[in-house]
Image (cartoon, rainbow, N blue to C red):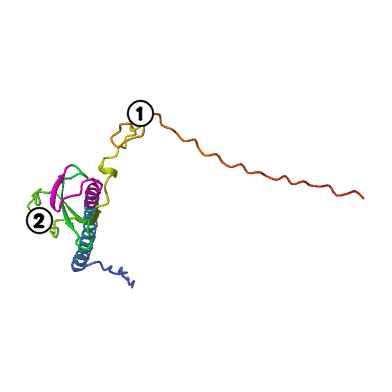
Amino acid sequence: MIMRHSATAPATRGFTLIEVLVALVIVAFGMGALLAALSAAAANVGALRDKTLAQWIALNQITDTRLNLQAPASGTKQGDLKNFGNGDWHWQQDVTALTQIPGLLQITVSVRRITADTPSTKSSSTTTSPNWLATVVGFRGSTLAAASGEVPDWSGTGFNNSGGTPSSSGAGTSGNIAIPAPPRRPRIQRRRSIHRRPPIH
């Protein structure tokens, strides 16, 4: 009598449907968190760029006010800047006199971007608006003025061929201009060292 032994292969266990669904949910949450982090980083980069451009505009406005020979009047002044940094901007300047220091003016400039939600309306009268991207404070003293109250000529045409001393308006007087000679460098006298030969014995 011949007996046959049937060899059965071990059964391999796979993933169940519940395990696959749980894995997909974990992957979906991870991808959602990654996309949210990337979106937040891109939004931060754009906000920092707009804030930097707004600070540049405010600093330029303060510099123009300080370099102006006429002192600005106290009060609020507004204006727009078109096509700067791929956008339009609105700035507001407030000039106040400091009572603690006579002759010193405080200049506060706030800048924001002009959008469909925030158009170029000039009705805002305070710098604490949440729409302002940057606010810069500067100062101007009464000592910033040209000599003799005249505007200096920086074009280099103050000296003409007929000579004369230059004026602030670029016109010269008669006479020749004496150009001083460059100073001479003092001559340094060097002593020659005499080397004596030793006596031969």
From the image, tell me which residue sits under label 1.
174
- The x and y percentages for residue 64 are 23, 46
Q: Is residue 78 magenta?
A: yes
Q: Which of 92/200 is in front? A: 200
Image quadrant holding the N terminus, namely bottom left
Disc 2 crowd, CA 10 A, few/some/many (<14, 14-19, 20+): few
- Residue 190, compared with residue 34, is above or below; it is above
In the visual, does 190 lie left or right of 81?
A: right
Amino acid at dot 1 = Ser
- Judged from this view, the residue extending furthest toward the top is 162
Instruction: Name the quadrant containing residue 165.
Output: top left
User: Of marks 1 and 2, which one's residue comes earlier in the chain?
Assistant: 2
Tell me which segment is drawn in magenta: 54-82
Q: Which of 145/11 is in front? A: 145
Instruction: Name the quadrant containing residue 187.
Output: top right
Amino acid at dot 2 = Ser
Disc 1 crowd, CA 10 A, few/some/many (<14, 14-19, 20+): few
- Judged from this view, the residue extending furthest toward the left is 123
Badge 1 element: loop
- The x and y percentages for residue 26 are 22, 65
Badge 2 element: loop
3D distance between C-alphas at marks 1 and 2:
55 Å
Pointer 1 with pointer 2, Cβ within 8 A: no
- The x and y percentages for residue 84 are 20, 44
From the image, tell me which residue sits under label 2.
125
Q: Is residue 96 magenta?
A: no
Instruction: Name the quadrant containing residue 157.
Output: top left
